[in-house]
Image (cartoon, grey):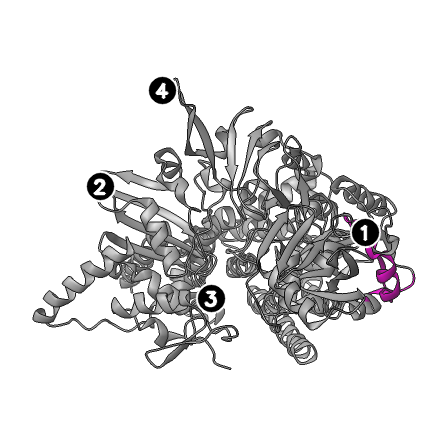
């Protein structure tokens, strides 16, 4: 039954590991804004367009961005 | 009527059809085109009509071209990358988040953008080689997301984010879970050999886990209790601190001496639940600021004239953008149409029509002559003027309002929350019962005495009391917010329940700028005269002309032969030999000595055709919808008053509409309003002040609860306890009623928790308190109180919605 020492040590170590991860994520600002990620998650992914079309698109884009400047 | 595809407004004046959609103006259509051509039409798929009409911004952000000013706004400026944060009030839905985080599609020099929705902030990281800050801001304005930049942003304060509550909550939760897990073997009380052998291991582990809980997570309570005892008050943190300390030390001694397992699971649970309550109560409206002072109102920079002294012959001046803080006496500055005057000064050149309603409460525009002094805070309404600075920003008449001591005093110290009142009695009675029980057991069976003393202190759970208020008020705060009343914190709702006097400001609070009720008195005008009048009004830019024109719009418009405008006097229009004069009585009439006294103090516009006086249009203030009902329902329990910075012109009108004993006082300067509230408070009345402008700032701070009525919550409002959207003015009595109900719920919750405490005390006094009993009782009481308050406030919220929507 002395195995229980090892079991307790491992479980406490795992718990501490998660606690450290929690502290790091708070420090990085994860909990400063708890609302926006819930909205961001629901946006759809962009479809990557095929190459030939990109060449013409960039031409149009530079025209458009010139207009905006 | 078509609805604009971009902004959702009805297309009243013009409808533009483009690509199967209707738009209300070219601004909206332009934004649609920009987004479409850059592959951003997903913007319209997320929400219906997510946009807003892009506002005109020509020249408004020119000061960003000035390197020094731009530098103050940047958060980071290294190599070729710059990072800047803007507050963008028009962020309101998921489409806004999407488009702002995809901004790099509009301009590849923008690297990353990050939206903080609750704060309505946008953080942009961009490459500074090709893109300047000025261009970036213009891009944002073009798509309808204009940032709000004020003098406040030029202060070099870095905001300190306080995350300590989350850390403490995390430690408490982590430790609580592990302690419960380790306590399990002891709960079952089975006398088994192996369980008994390893008991010490488990107990010591539990003790180690509970040290950070008691001294780090509980530190707020311990420190607050110590401070409270030192100042001879007994707030709710005192019984909590006593509970935590007794729990910890008794359990530590029991474990060390091997007498028992202690109550550390209850202690960890207690701290954990309390911190959750604190976290819940902490929620605020991050995008609204309740602490605004003049720095958020004034612009960051102004156009200054510099004399070019290079060439001696020509005295040329060129314009530069200067920070408002850099202005000194003697500088010449230019104020454009619709801009704020940031400093006290003297008018040099230009026609002046200033709107001071926000600052002094005067509803009429003020006109001045060159050489007159101009005060800071007004908004120029008629073209460009040049003025000379007399005093710097900090010395102007307006900022001296804020040097009044009321703004530095912490008025929260006056009010004792319900929880603190109860806690005083609770602590005293618990200590009393504990002492009595101990005395009894000292006589009866001394070995049990200390056990009973500590047991009483442990079981008398202030937990339920400490949780009742946060959850009730937190829920009420949320309900208030759903109905467009944004309150600073939950303490305000408790204070609102104690109100017995309500003071209203007039201009902007009771009156709305939107519609003007206009009546005509005099000889009826002929068709020809009407059309001449409308054509003349159309040519003028004066706000009164525009309102009047709006009213008479249907008549035929002709091009005038001649048009002249004399600022402050009136306008003259000539067509086909007919001449019409519109304006003040002195300007219009051929005999200025005959002055009709009834129209004195009322905004009126007189008309004369071909030098014959015809009549006048009188403009009445339009009062808010439901104003009479609000006053009537408040008059039943509260004393009412109306304080106005305006003249007495509306006195009769108001006397007719409002209940009999309402006090009406006019010509109040900001300091007079503050003093009136002081005198009311000296008679120990609890005052609610309802205002809107800077002239109410002192009164709002002095009163027990200060409420600001706002037509547009994204725009500046002075420091207050709550912001109410103007459309919900009629709900003011309902909000006060709701907060009174909330106070009752807290009382019921206290009584409820008393029952739990009595049961627990029964166990403790008789010496039968086992750890498991405490471990069950404490969470049970806390959860049931939370459920009770949540359900009750939910029901209240539903009733409110049904009655007031």
Of the image marks 2 and 4, the number of the one nearer the N terminus:
2
Q: Which mark is residue B311?
A: 4
The quarter of the displayed image where residue B354 is located: top right
Residue B394: x and y in percent read 59, 31
Q: Nearer the viewer, residue B194 or B496?
A: B496
Secondary element at image label 1: loop
B638 part of magenta stretch: yes
Secondary element at image label 3: helix
Residue receiving disc 3:
B186
Determine the residue positioned at 37% across, 39% down: B70
Q: Are marks 1 and 3 on the same chain?
A: yes
**Chain of the residue displaying label 2:** B
Magenta span? B634-660
Residue B167: x and y in percent read 43, 51
Of the image marks 4 and 1, the number of the one nearer the N terminus:
4
Residue B505: x and y in percent read 75, 53
**Chain of the residue displaying label 3:** B
Of the image marks 3 and 4, the number of the one nearer the N terminus:
3
- Whether residues under marks 2 and 1 lie with C-beta atoms below 8 angstroms apart, the answer is no
Q: CA distance from mark 2 to mark 3?
A: 63 Å
Mark 2 or 4: the one toward you: 4
Residue receiving disc 2:
B80
Q: CA distance from mark 1 to mark 3?
A: 84 Å
Q: Is residue B255 above or below residue B183?
A: above
Mark 2 or 1: the one toward you: 1
Q: Furthest-top residue in view?
A: B312
Q: Which mark is residue B601?
A: 1
Q: CA distance from mark 2 to mark 4?
A: 38 Å
Q: Nearer the viewer, residue B238 or B359?
A: B359
- Whether residues under marks 2 and 3 lie with C-beta atoms below 8 angstroms apart, the answer is no
């Amino acid at each position: 039954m002395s195995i229980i020492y090892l079991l307790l040590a491992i479980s406490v170590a795992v718990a501490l590991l998660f606690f450290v991860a929690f502290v790091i994520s708070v420090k990085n600002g994860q909990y400063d804004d708890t609302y926006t990620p819930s909205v961001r998650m629901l946006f759809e992914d962009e479809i990557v367009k095929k190459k030939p079309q990109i060449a013409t698109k960039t031409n149009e884009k530079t025209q458009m961005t010139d207009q905006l400047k | 009527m078509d609805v604009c595809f971009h902004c959702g407004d009805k297309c009243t004046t013009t409808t533009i059809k483009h690509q199967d959609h209707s738009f209300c103006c070219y601004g909206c259509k332009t934004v649609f085109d920009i987004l479409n051509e850059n592959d951003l039409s997903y913007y319209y798929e997320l929400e219906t009509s997510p946009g807003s009409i892009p506002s005109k911004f020509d020249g408004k952000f020119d000061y960003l071209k000035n390197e020094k000013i731009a530098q103050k706004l940047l958060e980071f400026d290294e190599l070729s990358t710059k990072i800047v944060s803007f507050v963008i009030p028009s962020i309101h839905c998921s489409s806004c988040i999407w488009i702002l985080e995809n901004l790099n599609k509009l301009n590849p020099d923008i690297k990353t953008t990050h939206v903080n929705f609750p704060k309505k902030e946008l953080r942009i990281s961009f490459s500074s080689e090709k893109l300047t800050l000025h261009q970036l801001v213009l891009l944002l304005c073009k798509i309808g997301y204009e940032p709000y930049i004020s003098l406040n942003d030029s202060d070099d304060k870095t905001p300190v984010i306080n995350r300590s509550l989350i850390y403490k909550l995390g430690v408490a939760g982590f430790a609580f879970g592990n302690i419960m897990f380790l306590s399990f073997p002891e709960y079952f009380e089975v006398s088994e050999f192996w369980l008994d052998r390893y008991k010490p291991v488990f107990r010591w582990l539990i003790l180690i886990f509970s040290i950070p809980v008691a001294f780090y997570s509980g530190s707020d309570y311990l420190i607050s209790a110590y401070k409270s005892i030192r100042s001879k008050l007994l707030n709710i943190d005192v019984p909590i601190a006593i509970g935590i300390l007794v729990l910890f030390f008794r359990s530590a001694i029991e474990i060390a001496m091997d007498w028992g397992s202690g109550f550390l699971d209850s202690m960890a649970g207690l701290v954990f639940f309390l911190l959750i309550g604190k976290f819940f109560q902490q929620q605020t409206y991050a995008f609204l600021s309740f602490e605004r002072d003049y720095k958020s109102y004034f612009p960051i920079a102004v156009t200054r004239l510099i004399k070019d002294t290079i060439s001696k012959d020509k005295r040329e001046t060129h314009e530069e953008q200067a920070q408002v803080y850099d202005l000194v006496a003697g500088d010449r500055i230019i104020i454009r149409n619709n801009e704020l005057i940031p400093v006290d000064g003297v008018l040099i050149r230009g026609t002046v029509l200033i709107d001071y309603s926000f600052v002094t409460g005067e509803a009429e525009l003020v006109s001045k002559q060159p050489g007159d002094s101009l005060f800071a805070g007004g908004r120029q309404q008629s073209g460009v003027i040049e003025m000379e600075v007399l005093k710097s920003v900090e010395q102007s008449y307006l900022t001296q309002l804020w040097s009044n001591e009321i703004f530095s005093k912490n008025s929260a110290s006056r009010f004792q929350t319900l929880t603190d009142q109860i806690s005083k009695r609770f602590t005293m009675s618990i200590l009393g019962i504990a002492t009595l029980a101990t005395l009894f057991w000292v006589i009866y069976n001394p070995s049990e005495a200390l056990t009973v003393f500590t047991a009483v202190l442990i079981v008398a759970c202030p937990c339920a009391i400490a949780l009742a208020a946060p959850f009730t008020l937190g829920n009420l705060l949320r309900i208030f917010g759903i109905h467009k009343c944004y309150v600073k914190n939950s303490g305000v709702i408790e204070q609102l329940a104690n109100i017995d006097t309500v003071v209203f400001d007039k201009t902007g609070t009771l009156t709305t700028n939107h519609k003007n009720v206009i009546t005509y008195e005099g000889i009826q005008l002929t068709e020809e005269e009407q059309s001449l009048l409308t054509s003349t009004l159309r040519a003028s830019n004066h706000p009164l002309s525009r309102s009047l024109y709006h009213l008479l719009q249907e008549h035929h418009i002709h091009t005038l032969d001649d048009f002249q405008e004399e600022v402050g006097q009136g306008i003259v229009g000539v067509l086909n030999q007919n001449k019409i004069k519109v304006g003040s009585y002195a300007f219009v009439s051929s005999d200025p000595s005959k002055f009709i006294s009834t129209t004195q103090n009322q905004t009126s516009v007189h008309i004369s055709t071909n030098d014959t006086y015809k009549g006048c249009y009188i403009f009445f203030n339009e009062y808010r919808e439901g104003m009479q009902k609000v006053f009537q329902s408040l008059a039943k329990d509260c004393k009412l008053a109306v304080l106005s910075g305006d003249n007495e012109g509306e006195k009769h009108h108001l006397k007719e509409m409002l209940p009999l004993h309402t006090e009406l006082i006019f010509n109040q300067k900001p300091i007079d309003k503050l003093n009136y509230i002081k005198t009311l408070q000296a008679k120990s009345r609890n005052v609610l002040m309802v205002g809107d402008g800077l002239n109410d700032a002192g009164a709002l701070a002095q009163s027990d609860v200060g409420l600001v009525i706002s037509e547009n919550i994204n725009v500046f409002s002075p420091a207050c306890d709550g912001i109410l959207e103007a459309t919900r003015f009629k709900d003011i009595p309902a909000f006060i009623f709701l907060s009174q109900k909330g106070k009752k719920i807290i009382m019921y919750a206290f009584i409820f928790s008393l029952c739990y405490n009595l049961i627990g005390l029964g166990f403790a006094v008789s010496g039968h308190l086992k750890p498991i009993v405490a471990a069950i009782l404490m969470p049970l009481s806390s959860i049931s109180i939370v459920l009770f308050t949540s359900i009750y406030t939910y029901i209240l919220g539903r009733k409110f919605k049904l009655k007031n929507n």
